[in-house]
Image (cartoon, helix red, strand yellow):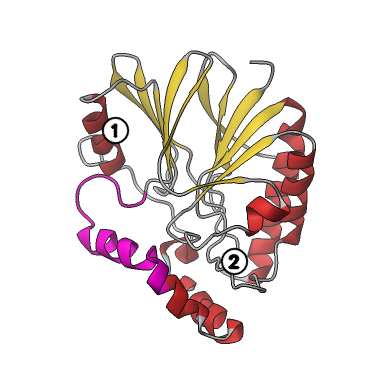
Amino acid sequence: MAKNIYFASDFHLGTPNYAESRAREARIVNWLNFIEPNCGELFLMGDIFDFWFEYAKVIPKGFIRLQGKLAAMADAGIKIYFFKGNHDMWVRSYFTQEIGMEIISDELIIERGGKKFYLHHGDGLGPGDNKYKFLRKIFRSKFCQWLFARLHPNLGIGIANSWSQGSRAAQTEKEVFLGEDKEWLAIYAKEQLQKTHFDYFIFGHRHLPLDIDLGNGSRYVNIGEWLNYNSYGVFDGQDLKLEYYNPEP
């Protein structure tokens, strides 16, 4: 590998308010400038936006600086993957047509540097949370998206923005480690290891940076979020590291 691979998730642009989101966007763009010279691939692993819906001729306004930066990176030859999260699952073709990003709906399995990766936003995996798993199927259905598209954008996006104000991300509180035996994504990773070996399981969604040794050379890495941690993952061809972006004030 000539260049590094980077993983980031849960920017939640749009929450808790415009001013804080704009400041976060500026920090993210600065981070992208920082990693760009050594970046071969970039994996954006869900909940980049706190809400996203593509009408036939309309997209949510805002955060054009991030989109412009990603377009410039893609034009420079950096491969970018965009995972659907539970907040921005209604991504369709816009980012592919305008930026060149590849959209990933669920898991993605890749091999890089002789290592095998299992990648997923993390929502709907592991034990419990059956209510969300049921709602996820409904919200991801084409019929549900068709119904929402019937709403005028001012109404539809307005309703969604109101919902996001009560979301977990809007509270900006730090999550607490539950213990390896209760971390549902660690449990899910261990279940997958019973079927096949992966060197790395990389997830977002949890809002807590984690690096857990699963044994037999396998690790579960949660790349955290950008409301509190500015955390991300980087693979240099030999090892995956969990790092934090802390620019000088």
The percent coordinates of residue 75 (x first, y second) are: 79, 40
| Residue 179 on the magenta span | no
The percent coordinates of residue 202 (x first, y second) are: 43, 34
Q: Name the residue under label 1.
A: 189
Residue 248 seen in the current view: no
The residue lying toward the viewer, choosing from 230 and 185, is 185
Give the spatial CA distance, label 2 vs label 1.
Answer: 31 Å
Q: Earlier in the sequence, mark 2 or mark 1?
A: 2
The relative height of residue 96 versus residue 118 in the rendered view (above or below) is below
Please state which amino acid type lies under the numbered disc 2: Gly
The percent coordinates of residue 85 (x first, y second) are: 46, 54
| Residue 139 on the magenta span | yes
Classify residue 227 by image quadrant.
bottom right
At horizontal 56% and vertical 49% (from top left) the residue drawn is 226
Label 1 sits on a secondary structure element that is helix
Residue 14: assigned label? 2
Please state which amino acid type lies under the numbered disc 1: Ala
Task: Please rate how many residues cluster around mark 2, counting C-alpha atoms within 10 Å: few if below 14, some from 14 to 19, many from 20.
Answer: many
Range shown magenta:
123-144
Residue 234 seen in the current view: yes
